[in-house]
Image (cartoon, rainbow, N blue to C red):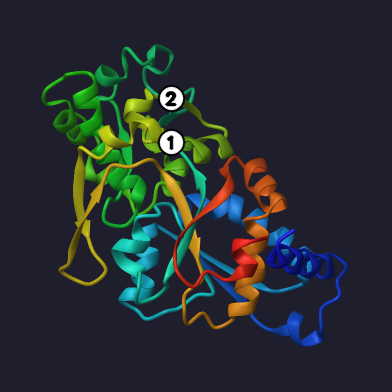
Amino acid sequence: MRPQRTFAAIGFALLATGCMSAGDTTRGPLVVYAAGSLARPLRAALDSFTAITHIVVDLETSGSLETARKLTELGKIPDVIALADEEVFPQLLVPRFTSWYARFARNRMVIAYTDRSRYADSLREETWRDLLTRRDVQVGRADPDLDPAGYRTLITFQLAERHYNDPGLAARLLASALERNMRAKSAELVALLQAGELDYEWGYESVAQAAGLRYLTLPTAIDLSADADSSSYAAVSVRVLGGAPGDTITMTGRPIRYAASIPTDAPHHELAQQFLAWLLSARGRATLRAHHLDALDEAQFTGTGIPHAVRFP
């Protein structure tokens, strides 16, 4: 066994038996900034971590781009940051705010709906393009300048146009998802769907599952889930607001991967390492999966200066 793994195993044994000093348990709170689609699974993970360590945790969720701008524009530095798109790290946060990040989960884009949605019984892969562009259908989407689900929706539109060889489809789908039905993060659309204010919404499979919604899965050539389709995803892109007022960045199509890191200036760096190591461990993965997030079997790291306790949980 590698020395780092032995050290981490001993550390978690101490955590599990409650063998922490009073100073360790009173530091904090551990502040975690996270993507809105991570709210449920990460809350469950944090609750489990708190039960073991008795560390107070403050979870704050918003769209991933909005979350990153809390650091870049407002200068607010959390202990842990977990985002719905790994690409936000190199685009906005590396190297100024962190030197590394860990991919830990994946997802796919779906069309979510309920039994009350117009034409719900007719929704299939063969019919969704026509149904979602009908005038009497209300379709929701996330704001692409705030939430990766928003720009991934626009990328999905472009991929669908190419996949079905249907010129103009992307424009028609965008026109059907009116701006009045756009929200800051995809998770906010769930309530509108459940209340009957929306018929359909573009979002993540994990969120639809956690909310008990019906949803239509799309071909992997469209849904941003498959590594094998990476090259075709990369053929399309969108521009969104960047990390400072007036800046824009290009977000290219790529498989959906969630990532997390500890900012270089995190106030409680040791506590952050403890939590992130726990999240990336077998127990953390099981907790995420129990709450519908498809955790990777092993975290994948990019960058330098990765803490040993995090890399070898």
Where is residue 93, by image quadrant?
A: bottom left
Residue in the picture at 47% in, 40% down: 107
Residue 283, visible in the rendered structure: yes
x, y percentage for residue 183?
Answer: 34, 50
Which quadrant would the N terminus be assigned to in this image? bottom right
Where residue 57 appears, x then y in whole percent? 64, 71
CA separation in Å, label 1 and label 2: 8 Å
Under mark 2, the amino acid is Thr
Q: Amino acid at mark 1?
A: Arg
Q: Residue at x 69, y 74 (%)?
A: 56
The residue that disc 1 covers is 108
Q: Is residue 274 left or right of residue 68?
A: right
- Residue at position x 69%, y 67% from top? 4
Can you give x and y, in whole percent of width and height, for residue 184 in the image? 35, 54
**Residue at far bottom of view:** 23
Label 1's element?
A: loop
116 or 151: which is nearer to us?
A: 151
Q: Residue furthest left?
A: 167
Inspect this view and state whether residue 135 appears: no
Whether label 1 touches label 2, CB < 8 Å: yes
- Residue at point 86% right, 71% down? 18
Q: Position of residue 156 (x, y in %)?
A: 28, 34
Quadrant location of the C terminus? bottom right
In primary-sequence order, the first of circles 1 and 2 is 1
Residue 43 position by quadrant: bottom right
Q: Residues within 10 Å of mark 1 (few under 14, many from 20)?
A: many
Q: Which residue is mark 2?
A: 217
